[in-house]
């Protein structure tokens, strides 16, 4: 009796390797507390999906996944993370009432749709697969172009309009209206003088980074003439990231110079007396 050993295809190997990686990275992306870790895990999800697209004979989706999502959109996320700060953690306080419940319900709804679509394709036999679809149109890219610009052209244009509307809505919501009139130079000068009279704050402008120092970098705090450090010269964002340089070495030349001046002054007073 002849026995046949089922062969394992490359697509099945790619699925059993990349699918667990994609699921694990997706869960880690949601659980991670720091935005930079979430961005790294999201990159793992996108690359795993791209490999799965390539294994399933979908080269167009593979290229779009790697170039568009991983190479472009993810880079925007990374830029935002770098602006926010890599050492900053997200707040777990729910600012929108019912946000978590709505998120759970939306996730369950999407999961239900996926189960319904996959079940319909498995049990009704309507799913033909990519090989048949690519053979019908002469290729994967040609088939996607034919479906997008013929059968689903209205849905495609409607989705484009929705994306543009969402982008405009996001910009409108992010742009806050000015609640008070913009302060001009006389008002700002009056406020500085009031703070000087009541709190003793310096009425002048804030010192720039690197003033009275041996470096002119943004992460180098300014040194006042007496050798002390001016905290107002460093951005609070840089202070939160912990990239401020140690200023002990910067204080040494200033303190030595003032020590020489004080010693010379004391010597001159002794000679006069």
Image: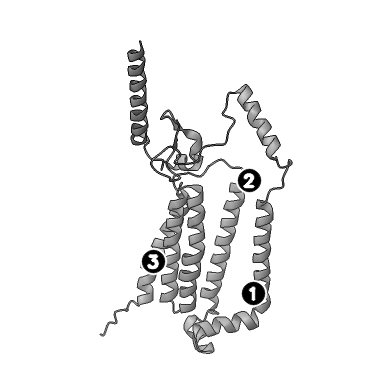
Look at the picture and state if 191 lies above or below 175.
above
Q: Position of residue 50 (x, y in %)?
A: 44, 70
Q: In the image, 124: left or right of 3?
A: right
Which label lies toward us, 2 or 1? 1
| Circle 3 SS class | helix
Q: Quadrant of residue 212?
A: top left
Look at the picture and state if 25 lies above or below 262.
below
Q: In the image, 82: left or right of 106?
A: left
Q: Which mark is residue 98?
A: 2
Q: Nearer the viewer, residue 76 or 117?
A: 76
Q: Which mark is residue 18?
A: 3
Q: Quadrant of the C terminus?
A: top left
| Circle 2 SS class | loop
Spatial CA distance of label 2 from label 1 is 32 Å
Q: In the image, 152: left or right of 142?
A: right
Residue appearing at x 47%, y 44% in the figure: 88
List the residue tagged with mark 1: 156
Q: In the image, 127: left or right of 160?
A: left
Q: Which of marks 1 and 3 precedes in the sequence?
A: 3
Q: Position of residue 152 (x, y in %)?
A: 64, 78
Residue appearing at x 33%, y 35% in the figure: 249
């Amino acid at each position: 009796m002849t026995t046949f050993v089922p062969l394992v295809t490359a697509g099945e190997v790619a699925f059993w390797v990349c699918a667990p990686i994609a699921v694990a990275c997706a869960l880690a992306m949601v659980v991670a507390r720091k935005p930079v870790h979430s961005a790294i895990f999201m990159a793992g999800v996108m690359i795993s999906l791209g490999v799965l697209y390539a294994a399933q004979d979908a080269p167009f989706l593979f290229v779009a996944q790697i170039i568009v999502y991983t190479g472009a959109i993810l880079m925007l996320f990374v830029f935002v993370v770098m602006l926010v700060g890599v050492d900053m953690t997200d707040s777990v306080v729910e600012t929108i009432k019912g946000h978590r419940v709505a998120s759970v319900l939306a996730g369950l709804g999407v999961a239900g749709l996926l189960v319904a679509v996959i079940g319909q394709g498995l049990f009704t036999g309507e799913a033909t697969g990519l090989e048949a679809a690519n053979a019908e149109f002469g290729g994967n890219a040609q088939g996607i172009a034919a479906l997008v610009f013929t059968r689903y052209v209205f849905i495609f244009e409607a989705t484009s309009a929705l994306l543009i509307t969402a982008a405009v809505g996001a910009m409108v919501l992010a742009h806050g209206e000015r609640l008070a009139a913009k302060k001009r130079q006389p008002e700002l000068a009056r406020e500085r003088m009031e703070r000087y009279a009541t709190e003793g704050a310096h009425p002048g402008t804030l010192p720039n980074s690197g003033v009275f120092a041996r470096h002119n970098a943004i992460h180098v705090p300014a040194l006042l003439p007496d050798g002390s450090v001016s905290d107002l010269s460093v951005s609070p964002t840089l202070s939160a990231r912990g990239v401020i340089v140690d200023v002990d070495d910067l204080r040494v030349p200033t303190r030595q110079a003032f020590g020489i001046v004080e010693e010379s002054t004391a010597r001159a007073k002794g000679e006069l007396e």
